[in-house]
Image: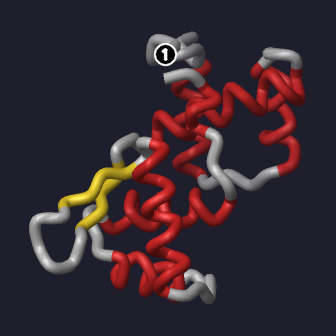
Amino acid sequence: MPAREYELGDAELEVLKALWDQGPSTVRAVLNRLHQRGRRVAYTTVLTFLTRLEQKGFVRSDKSDRAYVYRPAVSRERVTRSRLRTLVRQLYDGAAGPLVLQLVRTERFTAGEIAELQKLLDRGDAGPQHPKP
């Protein structure tokens, strides 16, 4: 899918993240998850977001039972990759290096993350590991 298909509003992304984190869920379960994260939204708002996400192809629903069950139709990794590519194009003219350097300079990493980065650099395979869509 083209990167533009992964354009999501902040609230839509929060709903999708709830599904990624807890798996197939009812509207009520997504609502509860959002409330746990400090997002105060109404049941009907969550239902609207899930309906929109389904129309856009980001989620699928199982309507065979009384309570509809929604599940992600795209992985977190695919959306992340697409959004990062867009960010790199918009801010760094397609060069990923400056983004990585900015992150290393300004963000904190765990010891495990640093070790993983070092392994990738030592092996020389820090480049794309997946074909571009």
- What is the secondary structure assignment of the residue under circle 1? loop
Residue 73, position as x, y percentages in the image: 34, 44
Nearer to the camera, 100 or 40 = 40
Residue 32 place in picture, x, y as percent: 43, 86
Residue at image position (74%, 55%) is: 108
Q: Residues within 10 Å of mark 1 (few under 14, many from 20)?
A: few
**Point 87% across, 42% down: residue:** 105
Give the total number of marks visible in the rendering. Answer: 1
Residue 37 placement (x, y as % from top left): 56, 81
Does residue 69 appear left or right of residue 129 in this picture?
left
Choose between 106 and 27: the one closer to the eye. Answer: 27
Question: What residue is pinned by disc 1?
Answer: 133
Residue at point 87% right, 17% down? 93
Of the pair 6 and 36, the residue shown nearer to us = 6
Q: Amino acid at mark 1?
A: Pro
Q: How is the image coloured?
A: secondary structure
Residue 83, above or below 33: above
> Taking 46 as reference, is 104 left or right?
right
Give the camera-side residue of 74 and 59: 59
Looking at the image, is 113 positioned above or below residue 102?
below
Q: Residue at x 46, y 11 (%)?
A: 131
Instruction: Indicate left or right for 13 with 59 as reference.
Output: right
In percent of width and height, residue 22 lies at 33, 68
In the image, is residue 31 above or below residue 103? below
